[in-house]
Image (tube, rainbow, N blue to C red):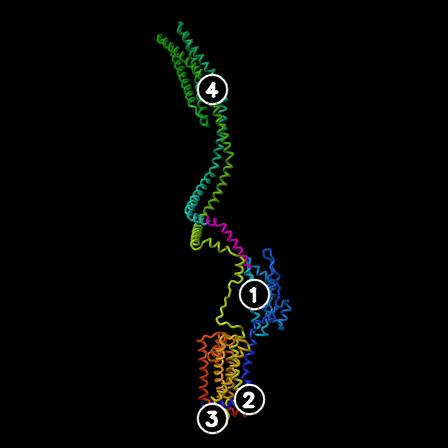
Amino acid sequence: MKNSWKIFKTDIQNISKNWVAAILIGGLVFLPSLYAWLNIYASWDPYSQTDQLPVAVVNEDVGAEVRGEQLNVGNELIDTLKNNEDMKWSFTSRKMAMEKVEYGDYFAVIIIPKNFSEKLASVVSDNPQKADIEYYVNEKINSIAPKITEKGATVIVQKVSSQFISSVNGVIFDLFNDLGIEIERDLPDIQNFENYVFKMEQDLPAIHNLLTGAQKDASSAQKIITQATSMLPRAEQITTEGLGSIERTIDFLTKAQNRLNELAPQVENDLEKVSKISNNTNEFLQSVQNVQLDFTELDRVKEDLDNKMTSNIQTVDAISKDLNWLKEVSNSSNDSGAEANNEEQTKLDDAIDKTNELKAFLKEAQTNTRTIDTLVKDKEQQFQTTLNDLQQIAQNTSVQLDAFINEYKNTIEPTVLSEVAKAKKTLGNAKEMLTSIQSTLPEVASTLNSADAHIKEGKTTLDQALAQYPYIHDKVNQLADRIRKVQGETNITEIIQLLRNDPQAERSFFEEPIVLNENKLFPIANYGTGMTPFYTVLAIWVGCLLLISLLATDANHEMNVSARSVYFGRLFTFTAIGLLQALIVTIGDIVLLGVDVKDSLWFILFGFIISFVFMSIVYTLVSVFGDVGKALAIIMLVLQIAGAGGTYPVVLLPEFFQTINPALPFTYAVDLMREAVGGIVWQRAIRDASFLLLFSLVFLLFGTFLKEKINRKTKLMLKKSRESGLFH
């Protein structure tokens, strides 16, 4: 170690005495810092300069009419972009835009098609369509610019979408507000509707019974109407026959009335004639009793008396037939609808009986007269008795005839005529009634047919209602259960309060429904600050490469020291210069560039640790392997730039780089510097520092124990390569 320290002191003295060496070393100390500073400054805040990124916008939107109002979202978007400084917007035609984006004057082109507003307006139709925005980008110009312009196009789409959603929801919430007011106004009706539903649910069994009963009644009524319809022809026939019968009866009564009028004088004459004959007979018998008769004259008287008796009997018999005919007429009038007159019938019967009695008396008188001759011859006294009997019979007959004539004139004839007139009047009324019924029968038939059709239609409706009853029953019960559930879970007053809102506030809400409250645990001021750890670590590694490229790793051959002493002696020299490089680059980041480092002191100290570790790695590779070690150091640099996660998260890298990432010193060096820049989490910082020191320990042990052995073989290779004249 003493020799190593001696080599280090000698190197320092040589640098201090040789101004050229001092200048070169000074250049090597500052040069890596420039690498870091320039890269950090170049990437300081590129996203703040996007207003210089030319992007063309073409508006071909022709607008649309929505509910009588003109809408042109394209024009509104252009007006918005004119006040937007996120990018350098150029408003031009499609042809010009496409030519310039192909040439490279524009990084991207955004085209608003002619049906843009029309498709947005379709939201109020039955077939809403999404609107399109055409986006063209020239990715050949730059790899980052397309991502930035794509972000700008996405922002435009989001802005249009948010404004459109805001407008639509503003209208919707205007309607909601009106709806809430209307519901609040109709709240009593809604509550009544709920009560109606519950009442309907309660009355459903009764409704079912009512429908079933109505269905049965309709069926019964249909049968009755069918029967009544089938009986109409019979009723029409009966009415027609009844009218015919009444017509015939009226004609019969008219004829009877006419005949009575004709017969009445004849009957009266016959009665008077009988009465006269009876009186004459009575007078004759009285005269016979007072006169001495001879039997010759008696035969003449007997014959004359017999003839008169026969004539009287015939007359009485004719009267009896007329009275029986009057009785038949009276019965016929009663059968045709006239009111019955029991008293009249009784009188006619009495008259007929009396006539029959009179006829019997006359026949008896005739019989007695015919027996006079026998009585005279055999019993004169008996003859006288017989004459007395004949006189008494004749006298009685005369009295009865007088009474009957009086009764016929005063009672029988007027009564019969009156009843016939009443019968004709009654039959006339019946005729009018039947005529009216007959004229009404077609209307009755039409009414029955109409009623039958209506009842059939009603029955069909009832059948449908009954068929739908289970469905209605289930739906009403479900609706009632739903209302009860809603009543249990929500309050309609709360719903009204929910609908009653401030439409403008709701519109603002849906324009930006979610506000991102960003909480930066370890805030980084800008992109340059975020890239400072990577570029600083990279500068330190580059500084190591510069040193091993220009400075020799072997000591002066005049010094008789071991390879191990040379290894550590020059390691001290390289490490000292590397620490100066780290000091300058870290302080320059903070002072010159103004990088916002949370822990400046630890940022510098972490730079020292990283410089020592990197120097031990690079120096060992070159000290042990010579020029091959330089190539290995460069290869490590290339792998670490890509695989250390300095620019992109490791999870976004290809699988190969994800695999080697834990084995790269850059991984832990960049992470350690990030802790100092953003805020130290000591658990991570100690882990990163531990892995870095482990890398350093491994390479130091490798150089300590294998340098001398490997150098003997590398010297032969070096000698052979120099023989080519291409290597020094």
Q: Earlier in the sequence, mark 3 or mark 4?
A: 4
Q: Residues within 10 Å of mark 3 (few under 14, many from 20)?
A: some
Give the residue type that dot 4 points to: Pro
Q: Is residue 318 visible?
A: no
Distance between the alpha carbons at the discs numbered 4 and 2 = 182 Å
Q: How crowded is mark 2: few (under 14 residues within 10 Å), some or many (20 or more)?
A: few
Residue 41 in picture, x, y percent from top left: 56, 76
Distance between the alpha carbons at the discs numbered 3 and 2 = 24 Å
Residue behind mark 4: 414
Q: What element carries label 4?
A: helix
Give the residue type that dot 2 points to: Ala
Q: Quadrant of the N terminus?
A: bottom left
Distance between the alpha carbons at the discs numbered 3 and 1 = 73 Å
Q: Is mark 1 on a helix, strand or loop?
A: helix
From the viewer's perspective, is residue 721 above or below residue 479? below
Q: Cβ–Cβ below 8 Å for labels 3 and 4?
A: no
Give the residue type that dot 3 points to: Val
Q: Cβ–Cβ below 8 Å for labels 1 and 4?
A: no
Of residue 52 and residue 234, the one placed in the foreground of this image is: 52
Q: Can residue 286 be seen in this view?
A: yes
Q: Cβ–Cβ below 8 Å for labels 3 and 1?
A: no
For residue 21, the mark is: 2
Residue behind mark 1: 157
Residue behind mark 3: 561
Magenta residue span: 167-192
Of residue 32 and residue 211, the one placed in the foreground of this image is: 32
Main secondary structure of the magenta stretch: helix
> Which-is-in-front pick, marks 3 and 4?
3
Q: Cβ–Cβ below 8 Å for labels 2 and 1?
A: no
Residue 172 highlighted magenta (yes or no):
yes
